[in-house]
Amino acid sequence: MADQSKHSRPKSRGRNMAETVPADDGREADQSSVLAINLDDPTVQLGVGSALVGGGDAEGPRLENSFGRYRTFLPLGAGGVATVRSCFDPHLGRQVAIKALHPHLQGRAAERARFVREARVMAQLEHPNIVPVHELGVADDGSVYFTMKRVRGVTLAQVLRLLGDGEPETTRHYTLPRLLDIFMHVCEAVTFAHSRGVVHRDLKPSNVLLGDFGEILVMDWGLAKILDTADPRAPADLGPDAASGAARSATATVDGAVSGTPVYMAPEQAAGRVSLISGQADVYSLGAILYEMLTLERMIPDESVEAALQAAISGPVVPPRRRQPERGIPRELDAICMKAVARDLPVRYPSAQALLDDLTAYLSGHSVSAYAGTPWHRVWKWCRRHRTWSSAAAAAIVMLAVASSSYLLARQIRYRTLLAAAELSRERGLELGREKRAVLAALSEIRRGSVGKTVSPEESALAGRLQALEQEDENRHQTSVMLYLQASPGLSRERVRDRLTEIHQERLAYALARPNFAEAGRILSLLRQWLGPQYERAAPELRQGLLAAQGRLLGDRKLSVVTEPAGVPVTLFEVREDRSGRVVPCNPRPLGVSPVTPCEVPLGSYLLTCDFADAAPVRYPLLIERSRDEHVAVRSPGAVPAGMVYVPAGPFYRGGDGSAQYRLHRHELPGFLIKEHEVTFAEFIAFWLADDGGRRRADYVARQHVRSEGHEVVELWDAAGAVRAPYRPELPVVGLEIEAAHAYCEWLGRRGRPVRLPTAAEWEKAARGVDGRRYPWGNAFDAGFALTAENDEGRARFSPSAPPGSFATDCSVYGVLDMAGNVREWTASRTEDGAPFYEVKGGSAQVTRRFVECAAGSEARFGLEDLGFRYVMPLDGAR
């Protein structure tokens, strides 16, 4: 490979960057991929011959002449999926780059199909900023490969990393204008792909290659999504995108229903909402790249995939100017970046072309759509575009200033002008504050009345309006502070301090109303620094307001407890996460005998135990939050039947990220008893054999659908009630229709207290408690905690399911077992869309971790081989 031109790019420190070529999926050679693709139809031919997706020789070294006519192979890079090498094409007498799957992946049809898909997408996107593909072929040993233009260069990720380290040569060469020019070329490539119906879905700095001679190329189209398009030039749909897996790093490419790289992933992409993924998802990724160019820091931390996905979905985004104030980032670029990474789709740029248009307007000195600017700002931009006129005007001003008879008078005029501008800006800021509060109140009212995840047009419009007001108010706030500080030499310090305190007070009140406690804490800290000694001697009204805000942020809340009956010993446990990721009670604190008078308790999650004399100790989880004191009323359930668990009345957090139907919201339920584990084969067959029960009804027999040529249906017990292998009497009963479950509950209720199937809300509260945790044991997923598809050791030990209570870790805060895994469970709740389906909760050995979250749910109309049930017993005979 030829030596790099010294003027084409900076030298690296301690690393040879002259031969950097992304090997696969945009990952550099020091990164690894641990994912496998699971296509719906791994034998699809893709129009290039069956050898491209058939089994290849996965063992042994590849001979140099195995790739057709190509010769003289030299390594360029390698990743977790493929290798890239330089080779010579004797037909055309040129060097090319050849990419091929690793030998151990050639035998995987799904990997080969995705590999072919990447080549065909790149080949059909003919653009100067997209790497041209020369040939797609099959080697002598059946291996798949494709050749493409060979480009010497570095990735944008390497350049940004060196800029962040302050490497002198890189800093000199890659100025902000140069980086913006690179970014605009990337936008042009993405705009062209969108016009052909292709969404990249994995845009990031490591997928942008900067050639030695000015080439700017967008790489790695392996996760591209083909949109519906009428353009005949668009690539054909090359296969499904669905896959499963896990990633080691939040900066590595993640494949599957959530496809892409978490730290650059749009919220709708990170949440797995595939139907919403469009060109706007690429716009968000472009915004994240621009953010990194401006700040030299990633917009989202990359500690882990889980943390990065959560931050992408709902984490705060600090504007670039606030993230790196010392870099002097222009306001227009700050606004363009924030509009590109807006979480709400109506606020985000509608297309990559719209983003490109705003950048072009900024570079040409015109106004941009993302930032209105002050009148002074617009005048300044006009002056930059009309330098002759502005120079003449400046000369006239200088002459007028020289002719001024009094420097003091000119200075006072300047101070008064600044003060007048500051006062106008402050008044406008107060107007924006009132408008923000009104819009926030209307938006909160809509959200309080709608717990579903469907966003109405009115809510979307209000959210977009609120975000625009917040952005304008932020700019107005910065302008006001700057003007007051510039005018301060001509004013008394007390007047400037009072004005700035008023501005920050208004912003503090809004942050608490939002509520954005992190922002409120930052403003409160800033006020303390600004007021200095005056903080303790502030006016009573100001001091009272600041102390109240400080109390909401840092102070403890009050807890009081009453029981029915009274006179019960009450103990309070803290709930903390242990080393395994489980949240467990610890640090018991006796509160005395009920009623417990209000006592100070720090914010956090807790567990109360009440030792009633006529029943087992009642476990009452509670969450102490900033917004309220807690007044807890605990009622004794009386005698609890064997095998039942008491779930006390009260509120809990329902829904959230894991739910397809509900946002996270507080939901109130009365108390109830729930079966400790699922109904077993032995328990149900006793009903089926009873004369007053199932009476051996054929439609009450559990069945399993065997996938064979004739699609055979097998009954899981015989006419005498003997369970057929591999099922056993002590395992949870599965394969029943919901009518059979209802009949069992009715029969059991006739023999004692009434019982019924739980509602989806009752099931969710029994599983997760009150603090909104994701799993019964806490917020961290561990495959060994429950019997699910990810638990290979558990599946090898227990088949087809486990006896109840086999996994002690799969236990809720109330003591209910097997809520996350083992078998899924019927509920009495129908799905919200009006279809004849019932909501199914929990996971099993046949489904992945997506179903394990307490908020998650699936749906069913017929009995399935991993679907069982448990029942609840209302208190006082309530149905």
Image (cartoon, grey):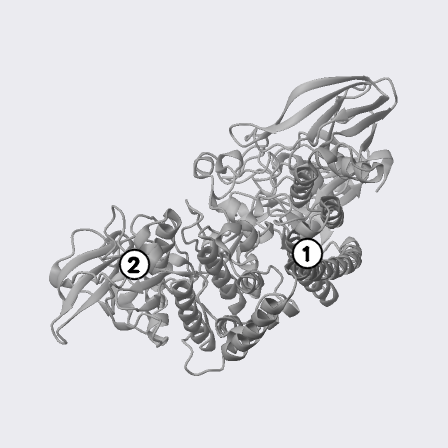
Q: How many marks?
A: 2
Asked if the residue under mark 1 is in contact with the one under mark 2, i.e. CB atoms within 8 Å, the reply is no
Is 749 drawn above or below residue 275 in the view shown? above
Mark sitting on residue 118: none
Is 450 drawn above or below residue 640 in the view shown? below
- Residue 110: x percent and y percent? 36, 59
Query: In the image, what residue occupies the spot 41% across and 72% down?
Result: 189
Tell which of 657 and 799 is nearer to you.
657
Circle 1: residue type: Ser
- Residue 223: x percent and y percent? 42, 62
- Distance Cα–Cα, label 2 vs label 1: 43 Å
Mark sitting on residue 154: 2
Pointer 2: residues within 10 angstroms few (<14), some, or many (20+)? many
- Residue 775: x percent and y percent? 60, 39
Kindly state the secondary structure of the residue where label 1 is placed. Answer: helix
Query: Horizontally, is 189 left or right of 818 in the view?
Result: left
- Is residue 123 in view? yes
- Residue 97: x percent and y percent? 22, 65
Tell which of 433 and 841 is nearer to you.
433
- Is residue 848 in view? no
